[in-house]
Amino acid sequence: MPRLATVDPAVAEPPARALLGKVERALGTTPNMMRAMASSPAVLDAYLQFSGALSKGRLPGRVQEQIALVAAVENDCGYCLAAHTVLGAKAGVSEADLAAGRSARASDPKTEAALTFAKAVITTKGFVSDDDLAAVRSAGYSDGEIGEIVAAVALNTFTNYFNSVGQTTLDFPPVPGVIINH
């Protein structure tokens, strides 16, 4: 049972209604996470602006989706795991890489380096080693792209925590065979 209320776009306050309308137009649906965020239009707006800015970055959408899978597993967020499995497939991530991404693995070595680094950022709370940084650089990532990996981790950690606090009702197909701790 959800612990944070969702907002019905039809009766939302004007700022929330406008933001939820943007989500509906972009995705064709309004996920429960964003309906819950709409209780504070500032929270929903912050999320949409951050994710929108990152979508214009150098990291391909499929790599960002795989980073989201790593974060979902590391932060025990079943909602985000389900959502990014669907969104990752839409971004062109293969079924094998969707499954591998949960363990910070990928068929492409450069992508795997990004996932390994993202996992290190999460597990060390940002205090990555010089070796972690050297490995992601040697895979071909620039400082700007490394910054985007850190930003993707931060954005996904926010949504992971938001959904864990709120126990957001799942509105994506659950990922079979994966046990999340809540």
Image (cartoon, rainbow, N blue to C red):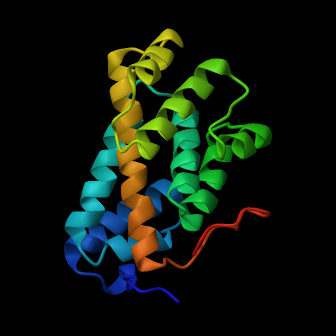
In the image: residue 76, left or right of residue 163? right
In the image: residue 140, left or right of residue 155? right
> Can the viewer see residue 114?
yes
Residue at image location 68% in from the left, 37% down from the top: 93
How many circles with numbers are drawn on the protein?
0
Q: Position of residue 132 (x, y in %)?
A: 46, 24
> Relative to 27, is 139 above or below?
above
Which residue is the extreme one toward the bottom? Answer: 1
Residue at image location 47% in from the left, 36% down from the top: 120
Q: Quadrant of residue 163?
A: bottom left
Residue at image location 55% in from the left, 32% down from the top: 116
> Relative to 51, is 23 above or below?
below
Q: Nearer the viewer, residue 101 or 54?
A: 101
Q: Nearer the viewer, residue 14 or 177?
A: 177
Q: Nearer the viewer, residue 106 or 42?
A: 106
> Relative to 124, is 37 above or below?
below
Residue at image location 41% in from the left, 23% down from the top: 58
Q: Position of residue 114 (x, y in %)?
A: 52, 28
Q: Position of residue 171 (x, y in %)?
A: 60, 73
Q: Position of residue 31 (x, y in %)?
A: 50, 69
Q: Quadrant of the C terminus?
A: bottom right
> Can the viewer see residue 56?
no
